Image (cartoon, rainbow, N blue to C red):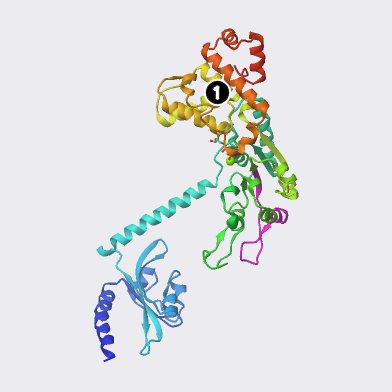
């Protein structure tokens, strides 16, 4: 009785095989060593090999580079429907093992199916869509590895901004390591891109890595890459780390103050040796990258509390650039605000909008814990919530102070008493100015102080600059 299933199977499979063989566009057979034993003329024509060429005895991959016949011979398992690239063309292929009497593998047979076959159209369609998507992602990735900003986009007329830009321009030409320090939203990332764009490496990649955003266990792989087959579950082809991706260009280490100590040690070694070792490999790779690091944390304090290695700090603190908080350069608010309004106008296609002096007073009185990013967001909200062509302080009232609590990292700074007092003074003065319609004498009366001391306070609080 044991022969029955085999016979039935044979009866079922034979017609399918015959059908495939008769409609197929090419037929190939290999032996158990994956050497070609036979290839029909149609297949040769498809591959662009002369019909008279004898390919028997040759290793299959020599003739068809992407062939998976060896896999079928090794595993004994068929690959029933697959797509195979050959040059710029894609073939639909079927690969079956050839088994002997006792089930031993004798070789394999491969067929190229008619690629215009109706029933394969959905598969082809899906494949070409995926291929398109892959190509687009690749293009986007290449774009991402370029500088997004230049110095001209770093706006500001204050002396502080002028100095920052002068230093950054000089650093760009020197190829030295730059450390950008400043509160959140002060433009560290923008400046890092601008430095790369103005450097001799601008035509090479700019690769960023946000240390704070990556789990500690993945940092090393992210930095140094993973060798092929390094460990179970790893991508069998391996993966390049950011050092390799940035080779020849710039590596932007964002939030470096958040780097765990163990990783700091490994980074320091890489920077000193100018060599990296991908995970699971015993081979070192030489790398040539320019480092730009950024942090919103007080690195020197982290060094003092042993949370940041002193030797790594000295290695990256070659050209330190401190980005001043917005509240210390309120004269930049006009130009930033104007520029952002232009951005929104272009985005929405609406008409020109401007800020009333009362609105500017109010913006200059604000503390801006989120700095330029916060200014951008506040303006965007005022812009979207109101249709008026002139935005006044009234429009900003519901959006500004009190409503936006400072992020946790900024709380320590805002707890200082002197700071709280200045903040209260700013709020009172701008409220008085608003009520007085910008008339300073009247505002002074409302505040029950002299006009002179109002001027004095406003100058001290940076509320008069650029006015
Ligand atoms: N001087 C500037 N001129 C124009 N736009 C600026 C300026 N500074 C910052 N911005 C804008 O403010 C936003 C925040 O800037 P960026 O991301 O560079 O800040 P950051 O210092 O890296 O902040 P974080 O520490 O939170 O990462 C961005 O949209 C940036 O374009
Ligand atoms: Mg940043």
The stretch drawn in magenta includes residue 289: yes
Position of residue 350 in the picture relative to residue 193 (left or right): left
Residue 434 seen from this side: yes
Position of residue 93 in the picture relative to residue 217 (left or right): left
Q: Residue 45 sits in which quadrant?
A: bottom left
Q: Quadrant of ligand 2?
A: top right
> Dot 1, crowdedness within 10 Å: few (<14), some or many (≥20)?
many
Question: How many marks are shown on the rendered structure?
Answer: 1
List x then y, in percent, for residue 405.
Answer: 54, 33
List x then y, in percent, for residue 84.
Answer: 39, 66
* Residue at x 61% of width, y 40% of height: 192
What residue is disc 1 on? Answer: 363
The kind of secondary structure element at disc 1 is helix
The stretch drawn in magenta includes residue 68: no
Position of residue 363 in the picture relative to residue 182 (left or right): left
* Residue at x 56% of width, y 67% of height: 231
Residue situated in front as seen by the camera: 69 or 449: 449
Vertical placement of residue 26 versus 401, above or below:
below
Magenta stretch in the rendered image: 268-293
* Residue at x 66% of width, y 47% of height: 291
On-image quarter of the C terminus: top right
Vertical placement of residue 10 versus 456, above or below:
below
List x then y, in percent, for residue 25.
Answer: 31, 71
On-image quarter of the N terminus: bottom left
List x then y, in percent, for residue 81.
Answer: 34, 69
* Residue at x 40% of width, y 30% of height: 348
């Amino acid at each position: 009785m044991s022969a029955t299933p085999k016979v039935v199977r044979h009866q079922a499979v034979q017609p399918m095989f015959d059908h495939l063989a008769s409609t197929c566009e090419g037929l190939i057979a290999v032996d158990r060593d994956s050497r070609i034993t036979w290839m029909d003329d149609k297949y040769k024509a498809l591959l662009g090999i002369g019909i008279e060429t004898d390919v028997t005895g040759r290793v299959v991959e020599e003739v068809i580079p992407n062939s998976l016949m060896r896999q079928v011979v090794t595993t004994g398992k068929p690959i029933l429907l697959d797509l195979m690239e050959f040059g710029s063309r894609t073939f639909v292929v079927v690969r079956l093992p050839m088994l002997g009497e006792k089930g031993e593998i004798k070789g394999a047979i491969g067929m190229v199916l008619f690629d215009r076959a109706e029933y394969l159209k959905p598969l082809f369609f899906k494949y070409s869509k995926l291929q398109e998507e892959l190509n687009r992602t690749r293009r986007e990735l290449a774009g991402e590895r370029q500088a997004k900003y230049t110095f001209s986009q770093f706006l500001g007329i204050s002396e502080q901004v002028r100095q920052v830009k002068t230093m950054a321009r000089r650093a760009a030409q020197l190829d030295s390591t730059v450390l950008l320090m400043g509160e959140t939203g002060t433009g560290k990332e923008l400046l890092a891109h601008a430095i790369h764009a103005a450097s001799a490496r601008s035509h090479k990649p700019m690769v960023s890595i946000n240390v704070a955003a990556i789990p500690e266990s993945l940092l090393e792989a992210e930095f140094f890459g993973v060798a092929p087959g390094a460990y179970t579950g790893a991508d069998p082809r391996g993966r390049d780390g950011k050092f390799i991706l940035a080779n020849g260009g710039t590596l932007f280490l964002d939030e470096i103050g958040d780097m765990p100590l163990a990783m700091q040690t490994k980074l320091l070694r890489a920077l000193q040796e100018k060599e990296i070792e991908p995970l699971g490999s015993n081979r070192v790779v030489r790398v040539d990258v320019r480092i730009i690091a950024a942090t919103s944390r007080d690195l020197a304090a982290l060094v003092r509390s042993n949370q940041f290695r002193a030797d790594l700090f000295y290695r990256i603190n070659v050209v330190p650039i401190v980005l001043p908080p917005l509240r210390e350069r309120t004269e930049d608010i006009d130009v930033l605000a104007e520029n952002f309004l232009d951005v929104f106008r272009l985005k929405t296609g609406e008409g020109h909008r401007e800020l009333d002096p009362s609105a500017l007073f109010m913006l200059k009185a604000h503390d801006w814990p989120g700095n330029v990013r916060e200014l951008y967001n506040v303006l965007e909200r005022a812009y979207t919530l109101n249709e008026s062509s002139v935005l006044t302080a009234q429009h900003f009232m519901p959006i500004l102070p009190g409503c936006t609590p400072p992020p946790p990292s900024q709380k320590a700074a805002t707890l200082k008493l002197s700071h709280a007092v200045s903040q209260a003074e700013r709020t009172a003065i701008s409220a008085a100015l608003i009520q007085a319609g910008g008339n300073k004498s009247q505002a002074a009366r409302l505040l029950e102080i002299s006009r002179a001391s109002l001027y004095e306070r406003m100058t001290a609080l940076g509320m008069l600059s650029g006015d």
